[in-house]
Image (cartoon, rainbow, N blue to C red):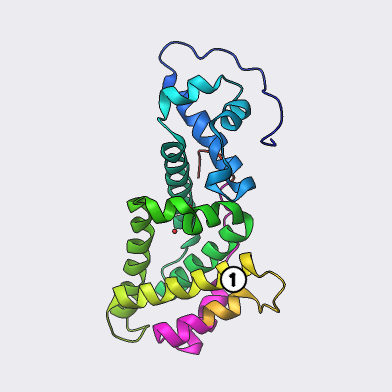
Amino acid sequence: MNAISGPRPRGRNPRGQGERLREDIVAAAVRLLDELADDQALSMRAVAREVGIAATSVYIHFADRDALVLAALEQSHRDLVRTLERAETGADPVARLRGRLLFLGEWVRGHQGLYKVLHESTLNQRASMEFKQELAERTTAVVQRCMDAGLAAPGRAAEVSLDLRAAVHGAVSMRVNQPDLPWPPLEEQIDRFLAKLGGIAPDLLERARQAEGPAPAPPQNGSGAAAR
């Protein structure tokens, strides 16, 4: 729903369902942030219109816009992590790591606005978003499994994980901000990152490509069922 559209009718929440209203407010903020791609452009009134409630009802749950945006980003990130776990199919650590990085790229393609707010917004510079650390730690764990199995070059998993995440973030961020450049397929770039930064042999990457199954659908905006 567009941020300037009129309010939708909404029935009163039964007693004890204040948490349900909070979830609806967060889901609406997620949808609007993905459309706006700018936390400063979001207004509490626009969120209230999206939900079909008075603006004062939003302030009951969130003291200000920053608090609401942080809650929306944390929910998006939680949904992303949950869905990402389904992308890591099979026992092959290389396939799991490759699938994880590819899925992140696909998520950004479908949620460019949320990505910009999550990583490039003024709030990202002003506020601590410790929830993003979970995705970093899980990626490091997959890199460590590759090293333990002798499938990646030995080294410090945390450093390699950081290198890989920086490379993938750079690739997807440039695609978002400079879409007209002659981009190669993201899969090719990620395979080069894994080979050069992770020391993974070409035959292992080819095996991972052959074992690749259909990727799970990225979480929908504000679904509440499924964002670093």
Residue 65 versus residue 110: which sits nearer the camera? 65
The quadrant holding residue 68 is top left
Q: Is residue 200 visible?
A: no
Q: Amino acid at mark 1?
A: Met
- Which residue lies at the image location 48% right of the left edge and 76% below the top edge? 167
Q: Using residue 141 as the reference point, say whether residue 85 is left or right of it.
A: right
Quadrant location of the N terminus? top right
Above or below: residue 3 compared with residue 191: above
- Which residue lies at the image location 60% right of the left edge and 62% below the top edge? 214
Q: Is residue 197 magenta?
A: yes
For disc 1, the neighbor class at 10 Å (few under 14, some 14 to 19, many from 20) is: some
Local secondary structure at mark 1: helix
For the magenta stretch, what is the residue range?
192-219
The quadrant holding residue 199 is bottom left
- Residue tagged 1: 174
Residue 203 versus residue 15: which sits nearer the camera? 15
Locate residue 35, reporting x and y percent.
64, 46
Locate residue 115, reporting x and y percent.
54, 56
Locate residue 119, reporting x and y percent.
47, 58
